[in-house]
Image (cartoon, helix red, strand yellow):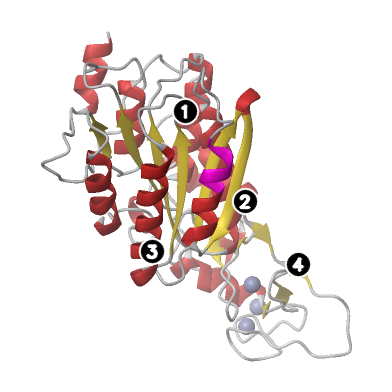
Amino acid sequence: MREDVYFYLDLTTDLLKKKELVKVIKYYIDEKNKTNIKGRYSLLIFQEEGNPIFITDKKDSGIIAKSVDENWKLRPKKRSYFENGLFYIFSYIAETVRKKSKFNRIIIITDTPSDLSEGYQEALFNLVSKIKNFPTFIDIIRISDSSERFFSDDVKLNMLASDTKGGIFYLKEKKELANVIKKLVKTKQFTTTFVDQPDRIKISQEDYAFYNHLAKPLKKAEASMDKLVCHLCKEEVCPICTDVYDIPLVCEDCNTNFHNCCITNYTINHNIGIPNILRCPGPSCDVLIKIDEDEIIEVSGEVEVSVKEFMAEETLHEIPKTIPKVQPLPSSSNVGFVKTDKPEMRPSSIEDSIKESR
Ligand SMILES: [Zn+2]
Ligand SMILES: [Zn+2]
Ligand SMILES: [Zn+2]
């Protein structure tokens, strides 16, 4: 599957030199391009005052390298915009995965803990719980002065990487960067997402609302003289209900038509882990679409619960009004660190991190 990669440079110090950075990023893209034929590359770097430069969807490593070069000098030197940067990237991913199914990988190179309020962090983790299912992986490379061993944001970084099955790397010497990047080029995907394990997804009501909002409903076809043929059954009249008023609906993105009954049946076997949401089966379309929640129960005898009932049953728990300070992750989220001997990596478990932070 296509993988889109987002480099996020969260660097306020001069520990890393621009030249070294440009070199490894170029190397990564050039190597990755050999196997990730359809992949695209993006770069986020803030400027002073917190204005983001976000170059998206590039194929050519030269363009990304040039953007680093041009925007390096005016990057913020006083503070990190860590959370803001991720919000930008997440909203871009949410918009683009609506159109195409793909893997997303965010590579954050950071040298400064951000000290934003807990409210920001909560909002961040709320978004991560949605975006990770697309799937999105977050790799974090923390560069530091060799004297530093612990950082105020260790817990946050570990949670981000483990929750999204990415890796976390602590670099004490900048020359280790090239080795980490080499390892990241070879990273194999962990694919325990709802793409291949639809029955194991557990999402909250809030997350459900998010996916439901991303997916478009099919539209009623414009009145026309032409008889519309359903893409799935290849018939004008729906063979399931034989009702002439089951006029094929249309996907706004690809203009493909589907009988209500046919797309409902199709959805039962091809949803994205949420019963009424699927990717459009139209030719070379992949957009997220949804059918009426109530249709699922009407048509098929195999599905015994409505979407609403499914959501009520499958929800882990109600989202509490006030979120606890450090929210432990569900036990199902295995810590998916990339194995490496050197540079040093600290695969401290989330539980340990939480304990330490108390
Ligand atoms: Zn049909
Ligand atoms: Zn029908
Ligand atoms: Zn479509």
Kindly identify which residue carries mark 2: 214
Q: Residues within 10 Å of mark 1 (few under 14, many from 20)?
A: few
Q: Nearer the viewer, residue 81 or 181?
A: 181
Upstream in sequence: badge 3 or badge 4: 3
- x and y, in percent, of residue 24 in the image: 35, 50
Which picture quadrant has residue 160?
top left
Quick check: is the Cβ at mark 3 less than 8 Å away from ligand 3? no
Whether label 2 touches label 1, CB < 8 Å: no
Please give left or right for residue 244 compared with residue 110 in the image. right
Whether label 3 touches label 4, CB < 8 Å: no
Disc 3 on helix, strand or loop? helix
Disc 1 on helix, strand or loop? loop
Residue 94 to residue 304: above or below: above
Kindly identify which residue carries mark 4: 219
Which SS type dominates the magenta stretch? helix
Q: Residues within 10 Å of mark 3 (few under 14, many from 20)?
A: some
Q: Residue at x 10, y 42 (%)?
A: 341
Q: Residues within 10 Å of mark 2 (few under 14, many from 20)?
A: some
Disc 4 on helix, strand or loop? strand
Kindly identify which residue carries mark 1: 318
Kindly identify which residue carries mark 3: 30
Quadrant containing the C terminus is top left
Residue 206 in sight from this viewpoint: no
At label 2, which amino acid type do we have? Leu
At label 3, which amino acid type do we have? Asp
At label 4, which amino acid type do we have? Lys
Residue 282 to residue 116: above or below: below
